[in-house]
Image (cartoon, coloured by chain):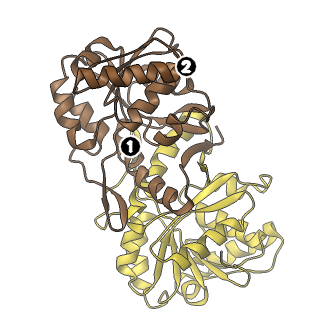
Chain colours: A yellow, B brown
Amino acid sequence: MSDVVGVVVGVLGGTGPQGRGLALRWAGAGIEVIIGSRSAERAESAAAELRAEAGVDTVRGLDNAGCAAEADVVLVAVPWEGHGELLTALRDELVGKIVIDCVNPLGFDKQGPFALPVEEGSAAQQAEKLLPESRVTAAFHHVSAVHLADLSIAELDTDVLVLGDDREATDEVRSLADAIPGMRGVYGGRLRNAHQVEAFTANLIAVNRRYKAHAGLRITDI
Amino acid sequence: MSDVVGVVVGVLGGTGPQGRGLALRWAGAGIEVIIGSRSAERAESAAAELRAEAGVDTVRGLDNAGCAAEADVVLVAVPWEGHGELLTALRDELVGKIVIDCVNPLGFDKQGPFALPVEEGSAAQQAEKLLPESRVTAAFHHVSAVHLADLSIAELDTDVLVLGDDREATDEVRSLADAIPGMRGVYGGRLRNAHQVEAFTANLIAVNRRYKAHAGLRITDI
């Protein structure tokens, strides 16, 4: 497995609950984090909060382009609606970098959540198409933002499925999951099998509603 | 939760590994089972083996139509290729019954497994369309046939996601999962969210290949 010491992780959409929560946990694990947002001011404001919460000085905020340019590994944690447009704009900054897509294209109606159709097959495959010179992976789809934000939960009790076609890249992303206490990164297949992992979030939301929980996944027998 | 005592479970495709394995475990849990197969002789031959393995006399074999007609709850465990044709032929026998679809429409190529497109959205939704007077659920997609068949594994250490729009039906199917030691039935959403649960089997196969395992799922925080 790779070593994540010294890796700078950028979080595009780092002011949203999923990105913010992962940033908090990585910062707490000693990893340097750059929060990205459309507004550099909002990014720096969120970064200041995270520094205080995590008790570290290794979180800073930049606009999304600055975040993508300065980070070594970049998590895409923006709403699905802005996904394609943002990645198109950041193509140059993301050349050669490991990109982790955690976006779940979901719709909601009176019957609850459901998976949206995606022309490229999945958000991750859209990223792969838009970023041909990046090393695109998919991971962190199912981690509860509520649990991430709650530092009274010291161990997160969840596996993170990491998908991608570049073995070194998926190993490094697995290490970024392993760095968070209680979390384990598990290789989960090639990027062409990302759709069902993204869409499965709809099932976990249904579980959460039925059981009043913040459900996660564990993979057994490994 | 429902009580499964006295329920007769039919297993269409009960001579295949998934159906046979679940039949073995249900028989061992004291549930009466009818193995269905295209050939009544092959069904009865498999039933005889299962009676010996499970040490019970409550397993018998019939052709698929006989199995569907005599069982209270029917598991569909046939290959995807024959799924639509079989259910069309058994529509009358399955009227009013709980049908459990565990079929995973998958393809394989040099890069491994992948989800096949299904016109109705999923195997379970195809069943729903073909069996408008049955109570269609989806469950048991991810249970390792190898582990089911290995009676040295007393507890299976896996959750079973149960999907469907009929609450009483999903509760009864959950009870059929709970009846098998180590297994737990978890409500997993409406039938329209079955595609990703079926397709997720491709990811578990990728996990199995990478980790030399027979992976299953656990849902955390419930």
Which quadrant: the N terminus of chain B?
top right
Which percent across, then down, holds residue B179? Answer: 55, 22
Q: Where is residue A113 in the image (x, y as percent from the top left)?
A: 42, 45
Please state the horizontal and vertical placement of residue B66, each as a whole percent of the image: 24, 15
Identify the amino acid type marked 2: Ala
State the residue position of label 1: B193
- Judge by depth and name the residue closer to the eye, B177 or B205: B205
Residue B51, above or below A10: above
Q: Residue at (50%, 24%) from the top-left corner?
A: B53
Separation (CA) of disc 2 from disc 1: 30 Å
Residue in the image at 53% along x and 40% along y:
B147
The residue lying at 45 percent from left, 84 percent from top is A134
Residue lying at the far right in this picture: please name it: A55
Tell me the quarter of the picture where residue A142 sits. Answer: bottom right
Total of numbered circles in the picture? Answer: 2
Which residue shows up at 47% across the image and 26% down it?
Answer: B24
- Estimate how packed mark 1 is, as few (under 14), some (14 to 19) or many (20 or more) residues with alpha carbons within 10 Å: many
Q: Which label number is shown at residue B29? A: 2
Above or below for A71 versus B130: below
Look at the image and tell me whether residue A202 can be seen. Answer: yes
- How many other residues sit within 10 Å of disc 2, few (<14), some (14-19) or many (≥20)? some
